[in-house]
Amino acid sequence: MKTMATCDLVMKGGIASGVVYPKAITELAKRYRFIKLGGTSAGAIAAGLTAAAEYCRSHGSNSGFEALDTLPHDISRHLLALFQPHPDHRRVFTAMLKLMNGQSRSLVWFFIRHGWHIRKSIKRLPQTYFGLCSGMTTPGSAQLGLTDWLNLWLETCAGRLQHDKTLPATPLTFGDLAKQGVTLRMVSTNLSQQTPVNLPHLGYSLAKKSDLERLLPATIVHYIQSKQTQLRRGKDTDNTHLKDFLIIPCGDDLPVLMAIRMSISFPLLLAAIPLYRYDWSRRRCLEQQQTPRCCWFSDGGISSNFPIHLFDRTFPSRPTFGIALTEYSDDRQMPDDDENINSGHNRVYLPIKANEGRTMGISDISNLVDLFKHIFNTAQNWQETTQSILPGYRERIIQLALKPEEGGLNLSMNDEDIYHLSDIGLAAGQRVCEQFSFDEHRWRRLLSAYAAIEAEFEALVDEYYSAKPESMNAFLQRYRDAMQDDDWVASSYKPKHLAQFDELKARLDQLMALAKIMQQQPLRNRWGNGTMPKPSARLTLSPEQFSQ
């Protein structure tokens, strides 16, 4: 049997736009085995379901991907019903849907007509975790709410349902996936600390049982409770504050569903997740440091809507594909009704040729709504957008162009719209399988990375030997002289002994010797016909927990 090629996959957030992903995934699954999967918001849902299906395949069954292939049909029957508002927000939720569907006269009329109910909802938002919908199934509903529905689909794709089609006793965890060689990552946003959180690396966090019961299925809450003896071992069990909370398992023990739910908490639409942490920054309130403070976890797209960086390596051994959602434009896409275009293919763009995808499109801003929309999108996406035009990066990102009435917050899409979006995803998967060349991709990545390394090394030589008022080389000599006199220039992170310092200095000198060669004989400006791939890149440092 021929060994399957392997790949990683990262998917962008987009709420209802996520309906494009299942067919793209199942098409890619015919050729590739997924090793690492990541995403944000709707992309986190897709990544989680794909990881579950790969988990199922690792046990010898393709039923997970077969189930995933039918997901658009199920969404077409239940999309709107998945979002079940709290009774206090039902009228505002319904009115907002009409506004987004163009059934309201204007935004001004919307506020005039529903102003009193809007004020009432705003007052109630803190009690409903700042969301119109909890994500759970509301009492009396014949249809599962979003979180319960996701729980069922996750276990279905993993092939873990019991014989009577009920949920297993324990939820699927990141550790279950890791044991089968599948890595899953997704992003949430800790609003209270203003940082992205790379799940499952949640860190030490607490939660109130009453909150979990309102926001997560019973199987997840029971699982967290069952972990308390293990998690509390070695902790201060006499801490009165700790007795009021449950410790959230993190890392391999974190349930996949809980991570997905933390990533999809779209502001106001879905309730945020309240977890608690100790705030050691309260230097003037030492006693209050012992009291956990609430941290609100919201949609991962707020901080990183397309985390294409999650699995990047300088010299990759397999491709990391990205599926990005972009705006439809008549200037870029052929019309849907063109007889020569197969369903969905006109909406798909994969910059295969070396000179394709080097520039960013220009969007029209003609009114105040457009202005604020693009302010938010720029703050949200600028890092991923700029990286996505680099050579060795851009040809692995497939762009799907969606119209304003497709996906996003359009929760009332009809069957035809949903199936059309699904066909766009299918076309995307086919395009990648037919046209992507890993050899071409890794060659461009190599040249782009080398040029960046060479440029950085050139700068290092100047900084190390000739920077004013004191070069790094001179600083190190001063450090060594002081160390010999037991008079430390810098008191933190000391070497164990002088020999260890000399080892550091010797390695830096070897590195600088290579850097001097690159500075004196730069290759990037005389390569081939006189240039390396454009635009050029540069090396940067970022905190490890946000980039792996």
Image: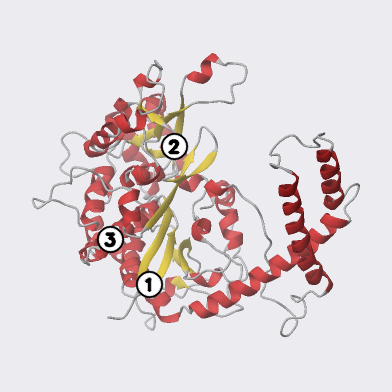
Residue placed at 36% from the left, 29% from the top?
Answer: 233
The residue beneath circle 1 is: 429
Residue 485, relative to residue 327: is it above or below? above
Check disc 2 and report the residue beneath it.
297
Give the secondary structure at mark 2: strand
Give the residue at x 31% y 59%. 180
Of the image marks 2 and 3, the number of the one nearer the N terminus: 3
- How far apart are labels 2 and 3 at the CA level? 27 Å
Residue 424 or 191: which is nearer the viewer? 191
> Which corner quadrant of the image does residue 46 belong to?
bottom left
Q: Nearer the viewer, mark 3 or mark 1?
A: 3
- Alpha-carbon distance for marks 3 and 1? 17 Å
Where residue 33 appears, x then y in whole percent? Answer: 35, 69
Q: Amino acid at mark 3?
A: Ala
Q: Amino acid at mark 2?
A: Phe
Residue 461: name its quadrant: bottom right
- Label 3: few (<14), some (14–19) or many (≥20) C-alpha neighbours in 10 Å: many
Residue labelled with disc 3? 53
Task: Give the amino acid at mark 1.
Answer: Gly
Can you give x and y, in whole percent of width and height, for residue 12 in the image? 45, 57
